[in-house]
Image: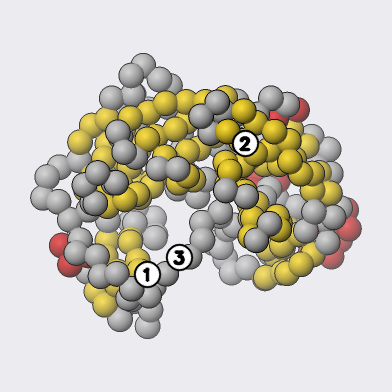
Amino acid sequence: MSAGQFSIINPATRQCARLPVTDTHRPVGMYPHSLSGEYRTLLAPHDPDDSYQVYTLGSSQPPRHIDIDGLVVEEVSPFTLLLFHHSLRWCADNVITVFDTTTESFGEMLAPHGADQFVRDEIYGGALFEVDGMLGMSCLNTEFTSIGIWAMQNNESRVWAFKYRFELPVAELTMQFGKFKPYCFGVPSSWDGDVSMLLQFGDWLLQLDMDGKVVASLRRHKGLLPTQHRLKQTLVQHSFFPTLEGYVVNASPFI
């Protein structure tokens, strides 16, 4: 992805193609549509007064407009979007926007009670992720000394519970790795019951355990930012690839 251009890539099959981009909308999320088996992208408007759109990959039809039913849909970044239980979700202020990928309709839900006592990104709010099979949310406290983790234990009743607290030795880590970047304060990850945080200090990406100890570190290249997205490889040959502009196999960015 470069300025003004988005691409879709399958690293396993080494296929790459450009996503259609218009002057009015940009792609922010991709999802499999469970009823049709199609892959679709959610397009966000550059003008907040315009509507969201859905585009079916490989289709010759123009994108469809989506009715937001009077909701105020907050700005979304592809780096903060979470696909969970057939819904794309993102958080701003105290509200989590939910885009149901089956019905292709918008809804909203409240962030955890008590999360407003923590610092969140000025634009995108808390970081959403999956923890122990549940919807999770993380927030940094106002002193930058700890990160709180909530989990929604019942997706139907939407009941949140406080799960974990990460200690954050900012002074020690800043001295060793560089200045803390609170505006992209952390990407939580849950794997086999262990929860860790990915944070940015100076030119370094650090993986911390719950006690604030560095588990792993990576000196980042320019433009490399932490996200909650994971690589999940598949050898499936998606039929939409050859229909997209700029389709290549075994070419840039792979060689």
Residue that lies at the very extreme toward the top in this rendered image: 70
User: Which residue is drawn at the image coordinates 59% and 57% (left, top)?
Assistant: 226
Quickly name the residue at label 3: 232
Image quadrant in which the C terminus is located: bottom left
Q: Is 211 positioned to the left or the right of 185 in the image?
A: right
Mark 3 or 2: the one toward you: 2
* In the image, residue 38 above or below residue 143: below
SS label for mark 3: loop
Spatial CA distance of label 3 from label 2 is: 25 Å
Q: Amino acid at mark 1?
A: Thr
User: Does any portion of residue 241 appear in the rendered image?
Assistant: yes
Quickly name the residue at label 1: 234
User: Which residue is drawn at the image coordinates 23% and 51% (left, top)?
Assistant: 38
Q: Is 78 positioned to the left or the right of 122 in the image?
A: left
Image coordinates of residue 65 in percent, x first then y, are 23, 32
How many numbered discs sit on the rendered protein?
3
Location of residue 163 (image quadrant): top right
Quickly name the residue at label 2: 153
Spatial CA distance of label 3 from label 1 is: 7 Å
Q: Which mark is residue 52?
A: none
Q: Is 127 positioned to the left or the right of 251 in the image?
A: right
Q: Amino acid at mark 2?
A: Gln
Mark 3 in CB contact with mark 1 (< 8 angstroms):
yes
User: Does any portion of residue 46 appear in the rendered image?
Assistant: no
Residue that lies at the very extreme toward the right in this rendered image: 172
* In the image, residue 29 above or below residue 44: below
